[in-house]
Image: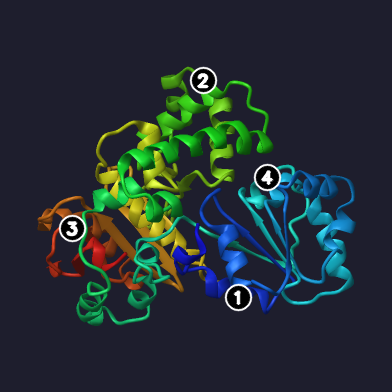
Amino acid sequence: MNESTTLPRLLAEPLAQACRTLPVVVVTGARQTGKTTLVQKLLLGERSYRTLDDLDVLGQAQTAPDDLIRRSERMTLDEVQRSPDLLLAVKRAVDEEKRPGRYVLTGSANLLLMRQVSESLAGRAIYLTLWPMTRREQLGLGRCGAWNRLLTSKDDQWLDLLRQEGEVGPPEDWRVLARRGGYPTPAHELTDSESRSLWFSGYTRTYLERDLQELSAISALVDFRNLMRAASLRLGQLLNQTELGRDIGLPQPTVHRYLNLLETSYQIVRLPSFSRNRTKRLVKSPKLYWTDTGLALHLAGEPEPVGAHLENLVLADLLAWRDSRFDPPSIMYWRTVLGEEVDFVVECADQLLPIEVKATRRPVVADTRHLVTFRQEYGESCRTGLLLHCGRELEWLSPGVLAVPWWMVI
């Protein structure tokens, strides 16, 4: 992104704080989320910068890693997943001298999920994740949704709090937000659908032909692309790998491997179930979402977003909020074997916040029934349920359930 148009990011302050505390800070996230821009802008003038996209730097990382990391007292190393053994050299250097902020590493893969990575830098590093831009980051506010304020306020204060939050930015059509997604270039720099489509096409090709091959050798790219499309069409659904494989003609072990690669490279999110059962039998399978709704829509070839894409937008904001905290909450969904379901359950400091998302302008009392059931099941630790919708009314729809326009929260 052009320096003059760079927007503030939610992760900027956690990154600065981490650099003041630990010798190694690792910033990971999907390619093109803005990791390089973030670390270069925040740490400008404080350290040297090397990227393993430079073949000379990559060669030195592979043949003489200790020499590379000792070229500067403070260093930023970009795209470190291209040479995982470099982390061993970082560990040796840090063990000799532990100085806060000595190394900032970035990578387009989750290093903790990569089988090739044998060194986690435990006790020496903190890991931060940069997700695609939230709506409020795109508005230039450098923030995520109102989750912190909600959880630190009393439930009877939520009406006034959310009215204030609704003044942050004007209401907008969630479908427009879903189509542009949160990658900085299509979300912030490109202004028409044709340009965004070209960008997503180029992104997909680069991911398949380069980034993916660095994580694992994939010879049947057509099969992998078919799986990406099938996964995009199942956004928001329970993940059944056998069924997914049957639909596209792939064995379950191959589907499992491909999904792991998509997760490792921050393309998909497998949302776990809330499994603390009291009186009801619960579904345990994860639900499938994408990191970016714009990319998911492009891969699926769908002309218009559906309700699951609105769910995905809310989840993306929750994930960005979660990973901006050093005491991250748990984010799950809840579903019983009878089909009762709450889209998201946030567990934070022994509090449970249930969230239901409805792509309707006129929510009705019947839309709250699963939130009510959840609150009855876990009443002693459960906060007011949120029903996020597409209308403009902020109101108590039933006891303990507040209906809120989605744009007042995220």
**Residue 30 visible (yes or no):** yes
The colour mode here is rainbow
Residue appearing at x 29%, y 67% in the figure: 409
Mark 3, residues whose alpha carbon is within 10 Å: few (<14), some, or many (≥20)? many
Give SS at disc 1.
helix
Give SS at disc 4.
loop
**Residue 234 visible (yes or no):** no
Q: Which of marks 4 and 1 is nearer the N terminus?
A: 1
**Amino acid bearing label 4:** Met
- Residue 167, image x and y in percent? 23, 75
Q: Mark 2 sits on what residue?
A: 250
Work out whether 47 lies above or below 173.
below
Q: Which of marks 2 and 1 is nearer the N terminus?
A: 1
Q: Which of 348 and 294 is in front in this view?
A: 294
Q: Which of marks 1 and 3 is nearer the N terminus?
A: 1
> Which numbered dot is residue 368?
3
Give the Cα separation between the discs numbered 4 and 2: 23 Å
Q: Nearer the viewer, residue 400 or 55?
A: 55
**Amino acid bearing label 1:** Ala
Q: Quadrant of residue 48?
A: bottom right
Work out whether 50 lies above or below 246.
below
Q: Earlier in the sequence, mark 3 or mark 2?
A: 2
Q: Nearer the viewer, residue 92 or 243?
A: 92
Give the Cα separation between the discs numbered 2 and 1: 45 Å
Quadrant assignment for the C terminus: bottom left
> Which numbered dot is residue 114?
4
Give the Cα separation between the discs numbered 4 and 1: 26 Å
Q: In this view, does 296 lie to the left or right of 325?
A: left
Give the Cα separation between the discs numbered 3 and 2: 39 Å
